[in-house]
Image (tube, helix red, strand yellow):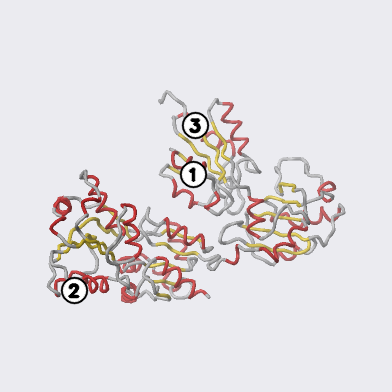
Amino acid sequence: MPSKTGKVYLVGGGPGDPGLISLKGLECLRKADFILYDGLVNPLLLRHTSAQAERTARADSSGKRTLQQEQINQRLISEAKLGKTVVRLKGGDPYIFGRGSEEAEALAAENIEFEVVPGITAATAAAEYAGFSLTHRDYASAVCLITGHEDPTKPSTALDYNLLAKFPGTLVFYMGLHRLPEIAEALISEGMSASIPAAIITKASTPFQRVVTDELAKLPDRVSKEELSPPSLIIVGECVRMRERIHWFENKPLIGKRIGITRPSGQAEPQIQMAVSLGADPVLMPLIEITKPESHAELDQKIQSLNDYEWILFTSANGVQHFFERVWELGLDSRLLNRIKIACIGSSTAESLEAYRLRADLIPDDYCSESLAEALIKTKPEKPVLWARANRGRDVISTQLKTAGIQLDEVITYHHQDATKLTEQTQHLVETGQLDWIGLSSPAIARQLAKLIPEQARQYLGNKIKLAAISPITAQAAEETGLPITAIATEFTWEGIFDAIQKASK
């Protein structure tokens, strides 16, 4: 048994948008040994941690209770007593209708050290992502936060609807979707105007946010005709009128689209951020993984003899990263390249050199192997050329350079390894046609998707599930395996993939 008890952090993860967690919250995730996260937390936040993580929803999708609060409290206590740094990751704010204070009391009773990291609560995020301000000089100088789902064991409601109906500001009801008719009726019966603006917001700040507005008396009927599901907030007040003028979130070009990101694990952060910024829901579905070679003997020999070469070629950011990692491991650094010129297949590969304060000497206009080989041939190298590459891939560069009489040496800096299966979540989304797009960024990835995609999902390809290829070559590889391509990037990067998806989605 460890001699020292661990510490627990009660962290607010925000209402849904993974970018709304605080810097301190991220620090906690990065240093955690164990994480308990609730059902309202965006799982994308877990990409910031290597800790063991478990979901602890207190109810399933039908509302049936599956985990008692006392069980959650005891799990936090037992993990902390094992000496671990524990994070209790909660949707929104830990204390605002989050029962975090109950967890804090349980920890305090056991003399377990804890800290609370506040989060953006759903009320403020929901209103601002829906397009109105809870307070405004013309509409409201006060806000009242109310639960729409009280403890069912209470003998009667603790809410005074007479006072609420006369409240001089904005009312926000948490968790009130299924009680909207009763809430509206109670407010109106106590004297609130039936025509006051009201809104219900579900899945706030996520790509699947829905907003329905109307007069308070009419809102329940409007909502009954919509297919809405929790989490939800009801907002009542004049501030709702602002939505017509300043809504912004739903204007994002890919709002509500689920997009499969097929990049290797740990390398998809730029694409995740890109998808989120466009309003899409990124679904991580790595189809290949990147690993180190079993032996570095050949690579080490090439590094030690770099002065023998006129050019070094990089055809991926992975090649750059693994090459320079090995240079560093050998006790060397980028000064080793002071007499060699660098060619990169495209802008993304060239940008990866910046971490080593290096600039590419050659980037072809078209980001493909053919163009890189043609551009290099035009330089008429007099000394050999070194290609730092993966263990597999197209041999166009090798063929073209050797045909032109250029001596080319190839060295394996990293390995491509095929994924053996889709994750359970991705499998379900594909089988049920709930992915809108899948981005394919190489022929190898396209071929691997063809191998792993479930047979029952093929009926959705090209209609419900569309495929976007990074280049005509990738599109050709996909079509050769029977995968229909809807969009092809004109710039052969992931930015180009997203641009192609946007154009095809209009």
Q: Is the residue marked by circle 3 packed among few (<14), some (14-19), or many (20+) residues within 10 Å?
A: many
Which mark, by number, is residue 400?
Answer: 2
C-alpha gap between disc 1 and disc 3:
16 Å
Residue 117 quadrant: top right
Q: Nearer the viewer, mark 1 or mark 3?
A: 1
Q: Nearer the viewer, mark 2 or mark 3?
A: 2
- Earlier sequence position, callout 2 versus callout 3: 3
Task: Identify which residue, 240 or 313, lies in the foreground.
Answer: 313
Give percent across and percent down for residue 91.
58, 47
Give percent across and percent down for residue 308.
12, 58
At 47% across and 75% down in the image, what residue appears? 463
C-alpha gap between disc 1 and disc 2:
48 Å
- Earlier sequence position, callout 1 versus callout 2: 1
Work out which residue is located at the far front of the displayed protein and give it. Answer: 339
Work out which residue is located at the far top of the displayed protein and give it. Answer: 3
Residue 410 quadrant: bottom left
Q: Is the residue marked by circle 2 packed among few (<14), some (14-19), or many (20+) residues within 10 Å?
A: some
**According to the image, label 1 marks what residue?**
26
Q: Which SS class for mark 1? A: helix
Task: Identify which residue, 378 or 222, lies in the foreground.
Answer: 378
Give percent across and percent down for residue 442.
32, 67
**According to the image, label 3 marks what residue?**
7
Q: Which SS class for mark 3? A: strand
Kind of residue indicated by mark 3: Lys
Kind of residue indicated by mark 2: Gln
